[in-house]
Amino acid sequence: AAGVIQSPRHLIKEKRETATLKCYPIPRHDTVYWYQQGPGQDPQFLISFYEKMQSDKGSIPDRFSAQQFSDYHSELNMSSLELGDSALYFCASSPGDRQETQYFGPGTRLLVL
Amino acid sequence: QKEVEQDPGPLSVPEGAIVSLNCTYSNSAFQYFMWYRQYSRKGPELLMYTYSSGNKEDGRFTAQVDKSSKYISLFIRDSQPSDSATYLCAMSAYEGGGADGLTFGKGTHLIIQP
């Protein structure tokens, strides 16, 4: 079965640079969620989009922004990167607003030097 | 205090044993309760979800929710070495009209000894 696709899988950036992470949801899933997981930590919810509109907002820094496009893929834009932004970034998708059935992608590992 | 508390372990049991994993929570608005399995450096994999109180069984896995005690459990029967992973509980409060993010526990690292 098709799963959530995230790109790139690995990313290395310098402090103060910008990064863009991409997420392609499972076919026929129209809702996307973004999470950040630091080393040894649980995933922290950042933001979600339902039907291409922002739905819920968690602990997303003001330096980060995200959007969902007409084909339902989503991009997370991260600016002025800090060392503390180094983490695994997961995207999850669900059908409609069924947040109880969120399926996670493999993640993007971001390292900020 | 975190909204969701979960013993990080590690929890080590022999193959074939029954495993009990638990979480407690403080937010009475939580209505959906999920269990995810995460292997090292991989994305969380949805195992089961339940709504409100009650039990749900799926193969070797049974999820229980006791909303009066704010306590949820996942039982794994006939545990296998391939069950060795980190198990994360997750919860959400459905407020209608949108897709809410999940609140996770810290995860319990489970080791099944062959």
Image (cartoon, coloured by chain):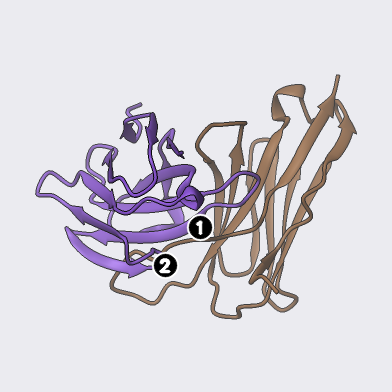
* Residue plotted at (20% across, 55% down): A67
Residue tagged by mark 2? A58
Chain that bears disc 2: A
Position of residue B8 in the picture relative to residue A80 (left or right): right
Residue tagged by mark 1? A44
Count of all numbered marks drawn on residues in the image: 2
- Visible in this render: residue A24? no
Image disc number at residue B46: none
* Residue plotted at (45% across, 59% down): A45
Q: Which chain is brown?
A: B
Image quadrant where residue B38 sits: top right
Label 1: how many Cα within 10 Å (few below 14, some 14–19, many 20+): many
Amino acid type, mark 1 = Gln
Looking at the picture, does residue A100 appear above or below residue A108? below
Position of residue A59 in the picture relative to residue A54 (left or right): right
Amino acid type, mark 2 = Gly
Q: Which chain is purple?
A: A
Image quadrant where residue A96 sits: bottom left
Pointer 2 with pointer 1, Cβ within 8 A? yes
Q: Nearer the viewer, residue B82 or A67?
A: A67
